[in-house]
Image: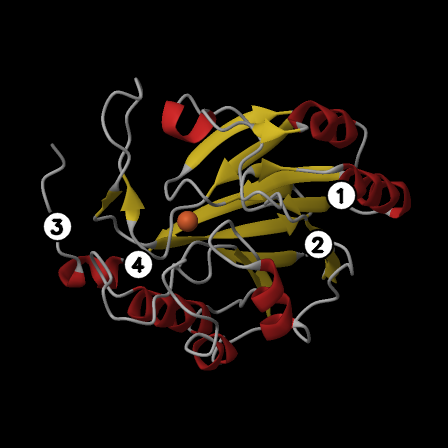
Amino acid sequence: MAVIAQITDPHLRDDGADPFHDPAQALRGAFAQIAAMDRKPEAIVLTGDIIDRSAKGYGHVLPLLRAAPVPLLPMPGNQDGATSFRAAFADWADFHPDHLSFTSQIGDIFLIALESTRPDGGAGLGAHQLDWLAQVFAKATGPAILALHHPPFPTAAPHLDRAGFQNADALAALVTQSPVRRIIAGHSHRAMQTVWAGVFASTAPAIGHGLSLSLTGAAPHRPVAALPAFELHILDDSGMVSHLIPLDGMRSGCEWIDNP
Ligand SMILES: [Fe+2]
């Protein structure tokens, strides 16, 4: 058995100008909830957008993340700068020298953390990441979780899909022949689930603010109030199952607004 907690998109600012609830408070709430579990996860994977792009660096988040009740594995998102991210978290995971991907055996789960932010800031994978992934898959023996910041699957939300995911087809071809049992991502700031490349795939809600949903793409894409949450991904003898854990304690701290 193995349990991995997934926390994503805290968007930790350093200017106190959070548009809705305080994501640092939400993160501490998630840590407290994990610490109180009768069967704690082996690790937390933080699937990106650790800081908001308004923040100057990671100095304000490191003490917060060091307070995690179990080992925390950080991944970059499109809001994180690759150079400053690598400098801040060099000792936190075994990052590839050419991209911020890594693997980690977590109990019976083989975690593959794949950087999905291109140098131009868009979503997708370059040849060097695909080559690395093929080598990782070739050596993997046990059940694996593939974690990315960006969902590689179509979401039916034009604001998310418009920019595309470079080399999604190549990734799907690799995943289909791989030991990946679960794909997890963030970026959308909402819970979404689908089957993609034959694998159950999802995004987790954000610890930070939510994002508005428009299924036509006509309404503007903007931050909205949302209840922060995290997920648990559990592997046992019967397979892999995931739990969505809303931070109900934050409800009274959220400034709820109408979403016209
Ligand atoms: Fe985000």
Q: In the image, which disc is placed on residue 247? A: 4
Residue type pointed to by label 4: Leu
- The reply to whether discs 2 and 3 touch (Cβ–Cβ < 8 Å) is no
Q: Secondary structure at mark 2?
A: loop
Of circles 3 and 1, the one toward us is: 1
Per the image, the residue denoted by label 3 is 256
Some atom of ligand 1 lies within 8 Å of the CB belonging to the residue at label 4: no
Q: How far, Cα to Cα, is label 2 from label 4?
A: 29 Å
Q: Residues within 10 Å of mark 1 (few under 14, many from 20)?
A: many
Residue 143 in which image quadrant: top right
How far across and how far down the image is residue 217, in percent?
A: 31, 22
- The reply to whether discs 1 and 2 touch (Cβ–Cβ < 8 Å) is yes
Query: Against 119, is 214 above or below?
Result: above
Q: Secondary structure at mark 1?
A: helix
Q: How is the image coloured?
A: secondary structure
Q: Secondary structure at mark 3?
A: loop
Residue 169 in which image quadrant: top right
Q: Residues within 10 Å of mark 2 (few under 14, many from 20)?
A: many
Q: Earlier in the sequence, mark 2 or mark 3?
A: 2
How far across and how far down the image is residue 18, in percent?
A: 24, 61
Q: Residues within 10 Å of mark 4 (few under 14, many from 20)?
A: some
Q: Earlier in the sequence, mark 4 or mark 1?
A: 1
Q: How far, Cα to Cα, is label 4 from label 3?
A: 15 Å
Of circles 4 and 1, the one toward us is: 1
Per the image, the residue denoted by label 1 is 129
Some atom of ligand 1 lies within 8 Å of the CB belonging to the residue at label 3: no
Residue type pointed to by label 3: Trp
Per the image, the residue denoted by label 2 is 101
Q: Earlier in the sequence, mark 1 or mark 2?
A: 2
Front in this rendered view, residue 83 or 196: 83
Q: How far, Cα to Cα, is label 1 from label 2?
A: 8 Å
